[in-house]
Image: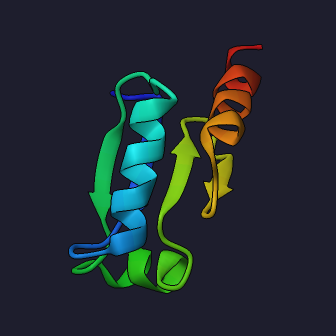
Amino acid sequence: MSEFTLFQRDDCHLCDLALDVLAEARLPDFASSWIDDDDVLEARYGVRVPVLQRSDGAELDWPFDVEAVRVFVQAHRR
């Protein structure tokens, strides 16, 4: 199981940008969760995607940049 999950939608331009940021930040392996067909996730993340979540439940909402991702990851390792 991954330590990080990216909540996203199909055909989401912002989600594509977030994937680019995560790649540039060299985020360790992460899971993707598409919210489109899940009523619970849609209710929680509908207007917020993309959202990066750590396994401890902390979330980083878009917009985020490389530095914000690195800080988010480092906070998890402490």
The residue lying at 38 percent from left, 29 percent from top is: 2
At horizontal 31% and vertical 74% (from top left) the residue drawn is 12
Viewed as shown, does residue 4 lie left or right of 20?
A: right
- 45 relative position to 59: left or right: left
Q: Nearer the viewer, residue 28 or 33?
A: 28
| Residue with the most extreme top position | 78
Colour theme: rainbow
* Rendered location of residue 5, percent (x, y): 42, 45
Give the quadrant of residue 30.
top left
Q: Residue at x 45, y 54 (%)?
A: 18
- Residue 74 position (above or below residue 48): above
Q: How many marks?
A: 0
Q: What is the x, y in percent for residue 27?
A: 46, 27
- Picture residue at 26% right of the left edge, 79% below the top: 36
Q: Position of residue 1 (x, y in %)?
A: 33, 27
Q: Nearer the viewer, residue 2 or 21?
A: 21
Which quadrant is home to the C terminus?
A: top right
Where residue 41 sits: x, y (%)? 41, 74
The answer to whether 42 is drawn above or below residue 20 in the figure is below
Q: Quadrant of residue 74?
A: top right
